[in-house]
Structure formats: C-alpha cells, structure tokens
Image: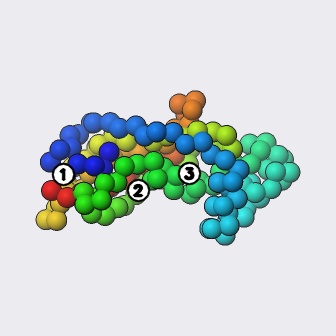
Amino acid sequence: MFDRTYGAYQLGEQWQSFGRTITEADLVLFAAFSGDWYPLHTDQEWAAQGPFHQRIAHGMLILSVATGLMVFKPGIVLAFYGIDRVRFVRPTFIGDTVHVVLTATELEEKASGGVVSCAMTVQKQTGEAVIEAAIKILVAK
C-alpha cells in the first residue's frame, strides 16, 4: 500500500496483503532472536496445559510478520512514523496463515511529505482478527 506519493491516497481506501503461514521454525527463530523463551511459545507440554491447549506465536512475531507483508517502496516511504493501540485479540497457532488489511483513516500533510494513517487488522485464514492496531507511515509528496 505504501507505494505512492502522499497526494495519491484517499480516505477509506483499503488494501490486503498476501498471506504467510506461521511455522514452528518461525517461533523458534523469533525466540532465539528476541530472547523471549516464554513456555507458551516454546514448550509444547507446558502450553498444552494452558487456555489454548497448544503453543501460540508471540504477538510481536506476528506484528513483525505483518510489517513484512506490507509494501514499503524505497524513495516513497520516508519513515515508519508510529504504531498505536496495538491489541493482540486472538492467538495465532503454528500452521495459521495470516494477512494484513489496511484502511486509510487519516491524511496529514507535513513539510517533508505526508503521514498516511491506517487501521490495521492482521487476520488469519478463518477471517478472524489476531491483531488490531493503527499505523502511521510518512510518505513523500
């Protein structure tokens, strides 16, 4: 979605990414990279006794995957301006396929470009939201 200059965006327009399936390797690599070895993500036996009855992906892993699914065109995107009101509303399991839905909610002109604000929903293959947030991207004029 972030592949156009500021003047080309319209409020309410929507974009959907491709999907990406979450694997066990994703959980292990993210745990190693982040240092987050919480057993809900990494211990099958411990997680089986919990409310989800299996391991779940780290919320921050899914948020990171979501940013990787978005289009950020070099020379157009000047900066990731911020993310607000992040909520991890449902678990993501190994084998779930997630995609991102963005809806433009606000356009704010700046001297160096413009901020495109979007409602972001990360959904899994069932259509259920797993993450809801608001993101802001500074794009060139």
Q: Residue furthest front?
A: 74
Q: Is residue 81 above or below residue 24?
A: below
Label 3 or label 1, whichever comes before in sequence order = 1
Q: Secondary structure at mark 1?
A: helix
Q: Secondary structure at mark 2?
A: strand
Instruction: Give the amino acid at mark 2.
Output: Asp
Mark 2 = which residue? 84
Mark 1 = which residue? 6
Return the x and y of residue 4 as percentages of the image width and height: 23, 48
Instruction: Give the amino acid at mark 1.
Output: Tyr
Residue located at (19% from left, 51% from top): 5
Residue located at (84% from left, 47% from top): 49
Crowding near pointer 3: few (<14 within 10 Å), some, many (20+)? many
Instruction: Give the amino acid at mark 3.
Output: Ile
Return the x and y of residue 57 as percentages of the image width and height: 65, 51
The answer to whether mark 3 and mark 1 are in CB contact below 8 A is no
Disc 2 and disc 1: Cα gap in Å? 21 Å
Mark 3 = which residue? 62
Q: Which mark is residue 60?
A: none
Label 3 or label 2, whichever comes before in sequence order = 3
